[in-house]
């Protein structure tokens, strides 16, 4: 049986795209001296974000640098407003937590699917 391929709708051509991907990338400067200390701090932040926001969260960036961490979170929604609110809430939560880390930067992006 042949599978049908349904190409994505072109929003500019009047099609309706129903999904928006929200991505937030958070960079932290850590007081850690070993990779084990870094992993402990990062794992704590990643788990808290996953539990509180039900988002896909992972560490990326320079994994071998003990003083820097990049944490990326993503959420998918059928409304751009909801995706924007979700990633903003994630960024605000990390900024508001009393971490043993300095918040270096927060970058957000919305991608229409």
Image (cartoon, helix red, strand yellow):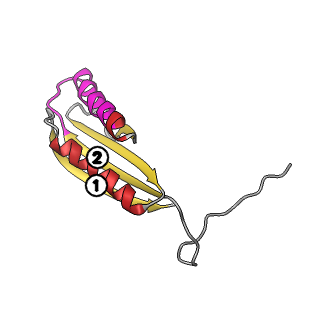
Provide residue 22's location: percent of width, then percent of height.
Answer: 39, 54
Q: Is residue 12 left or right of residue 41?
A: right
Provide residue 77's location: percent of width, then percent of height.
Answer: 45, 54
Residue located at (28% from left, 46% from top): 90
Considering only vertical position in the picture, is 106 above or below 64?
Answer: below
Q: Is residue 7 left or right of residue 25?
A: right
Depth order, front residue of 39/13? 13
Numbered range of the magenta stretch: 29-49
Residue located at (46% from left, 51% from top): 76
Q: Is residue 54 left or right of residue 30?
A: right
Considering only vertical position in the picture, is 73 above or below 10?
Answer: above
Depth order, front residue of 68/24? 24
Residue located at (38% from left, 37% from top): 58
Q: Nearer the viewer, mark 2 or mark 1?
A: 2
Residue located at (61% from left, 64% from top): 8
Provide residue 106's location: percent of width, then percent of height.
Answer: 24, 51
Q: How many marks?
A: 2
Depth order, front residue of 53/21? 53
Q: Which mark is residue 19?
A: none
Depth order, front residue of 25/44? 44
Provide residue 51's location: percent of width, then percent of height.
Answer: 35, 33
Q: Residue lying farthest top?
A: 36
Label 1 belongs to which residue?
A: 107
Q: Residue lying farthest bottom?
A: 13
Q: Residues within 10 Å of mark 1 (few under 14, many from 20)?
A: few
Q: Earlier in the sequence, mark 2 or mark 1?
A: 2
The CA span between labels 2 and 1 is 11 Å
Label 2 belongs to which residue?
A: 90
39 drawn magenta: yes
């Amino acid at each position: 049986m042949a599978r049908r391929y349904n190409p994505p709708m072109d929003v500019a051509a009047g099609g309706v795209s129903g999904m928006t991907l929200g991505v937030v990338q958070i960079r932290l400067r850590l007081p850690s001296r070993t990779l084990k200390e870094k992993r402990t701090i990062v794992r704590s932040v990643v788990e808290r974000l996953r539990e509180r926001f039900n988002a896909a969260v992972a560490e990326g960036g320079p994994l071998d640098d003990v003083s820097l961490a990049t944490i990326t979170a993503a959420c998918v929604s059928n409304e751009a407003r909801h995706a924007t609110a979700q990633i903003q809430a994630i960024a605000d939560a990390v900024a508001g937590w009393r971490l043993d880390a300095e918040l270096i930067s927060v970058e957000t992006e919305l991608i229409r699917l």
